[in-house]
Image (cartoon, rainbow, N blue to C red):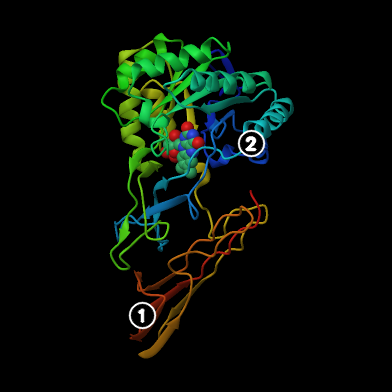
Amino acid sequence: MNKLATTFTGLEFVNPFVLASAPPTESKLKILKAFESGWGGVVTKTIGLHPVENVAGPKTIYQRTSETKPYVSRMKRMETVSHSSWNWELISDKPLDLWLPDLEEIKTTYPDRMVIASIMAGAGSDEEMDNWSKLATSCVNVGCDAIELNMSCPHMDRKDMGANIANDEDIIRSILGAVTSAVSVPIWVKLTPSTSKLVDAAGAAYESGASSISLCNTFPSLPLMDPETMKFEVEVDGLVTSGGLGGLAILHQALQRVSDISKAFPDKAISGIGGIRGFREAFNFIVHGAGNLQVCTAAMEEKGSGGVGQNPGGEGVVRQYEFLRPAQLSLLTERRLKGPWGLAGGGDGAVGVNLLNGETIPAKCNLSVVAGDLLTLMTPGAGGWGKP
Ligand SMILES: Cc1cc2nc3c(=O)[nH]c(=O)nc-3n(C[C@H](O)[C@H](O)[C@H](O)COP(=O)(O)O)c2cc1C
C-alpha cells in the first residue's frame, strides 16, 4: 500500500509533493524529469496570452547566511546556509500553442501524476474574462487535471494582473465565474499573501467555486545593496525594482496565512507553499491545515557553481593556501561581481569568491599575510549552454 497517496480536491496524488509554478516546471523536459524523480504532481509555470518580456540578466538569486557572519547576501561564502530566493521573473514567455502539445505528451507519459496548469490573464473587460476561459479550456482539453489561477505574482508589469488584483473580491468572483463556466476540473486559486484582506479574498474565491487556495506566492521585496561595492546584488544597468522573496525566510509567514484561512474555513482545502525543504516544513503546513504541499526554491537552489543548461556549465574549484611565513601577494582574479553568462538560454555561472581568514576580499588587491593566514580562492562556475 502506498502510504503517501492522498486525495486532494478530488484528485488522486501518489504523494502530496508537488512542484510549484516556477522554472522547474517551465518545460516538458523538466516536468518529465520531475515525474521520473517521483514528484506527485506539478503546477506548470504560469501560462498567459499576453506578450512577456523579462529583464535582461539574472532573474533569480539565492541568498545565504551563516552563523559566524550572519548577514544575508547572494555572495557565496564558506559554511553558509540557504536563507531565501529573490526573483523578478515574469510568467512563462512560451506561447499557449507551444505548451499544449507538451502538456498532452506529459499527461500521456505519466497518467498517474497530476498536472495542474497555472494560468493568468487580466481583469476589467470581457476580453480578459474570455482569455481566462480560453486558457483554462485549452489546458483541460489536452488532459490537465486541474487549473491554478495566478492572482498573486508580486511583480507583474500590468496593473490588472497578479497580486495587483488579488484584493478585489469582485474581480476574484468574475474570474472564477469565467473559468468555472468553461471547465469542470478543480480550480485552485493562488492568492497573494501581502494583503490584510486575505481571508475575505479566500472567502470570495471559495464561494465562487474554488476547490482550494494555494498559499503563498513570494512576498514583495527589494534586493540588497552590497556595502562593499555599493551595487545592488542583482540589477540591470544599475536599476532595480521590487521582486519576490521565497524559500526558508518566508516559512513562518506562510504558515500564518495558511492557519488564518484554515481557521476561517475549516472544511476547505489549502495547498501549502513557502519554504518547504523536507519533512519538518511539510509537517508544519499539514498541522495548520494544508492537504497538499508545493515546493519551489528548494528544488531550484544552486547546488554547485556551474550555470544550468542543456549543457550545464562546469563547476568552479576551491583552492586553499595556508601561509607558513609572512608574505606579500597580489590577487588578479575576475568574475567576482558578475558570473560568466550563459548562452542560448543557459543560466549564468556563480560568481567566484576570495576569502582571507573567512572574510571576503576584493578581486584585485595586494595583501600582506602572516604565518597561519588562510587564503581561499573559489573560482566562478562556467555559464550553461541551451535552455535546460
Ligand atoms: C524564479 C521564480 C519564478 C516563479 N514563477 C512563478 C509563476 O510563474 N507563477 C506562480 O504562480 N508562482 C511563481 N513563483 C512562486 C513559487 O511558485 C512559490 O509560490 C514561491 O517561490 C514560494 O515557494 P518556495 O518558498 O518553495 O520558493 C516563482 C518563484 C520563483 C523563485
Q: Nearer the viewer, residue 83 or 357?
A: 83
Residue type beneath disc 2: Ile
Q: Residue at x 58, y 20 (%)?
A: 136
Please give the label number shown on residue 31: 2
Q: Secondary structure at mark 1?
A: loop
Q: Residue at x 34, y 42 (%)?
A: 249
Label 1 or label 2, whichever comes before in sequence order: 2
Q: Would residue 54 appear left or right of 225 to someone viewing this image? A: right
Mark 1, ligand 1, within 8 Å: the answer is no
Please give the label number shown on residue 373: 1
**Is residue 325 visible in this depiction of the protein?**
no
Mark 2, ligand 1, within 8 Å: the answer is no
Q: Residue at x 67, y 29 (%)?
A: 100
Crowding at label 2, few (<14), some or many (≥20) Cα neighbours within 10 Å? many
Comparing labels 1 and 2, the label whose residue is closer to the camera: 2
Residue 116's spot in the image, x, y percent?
Answer: 57, 25
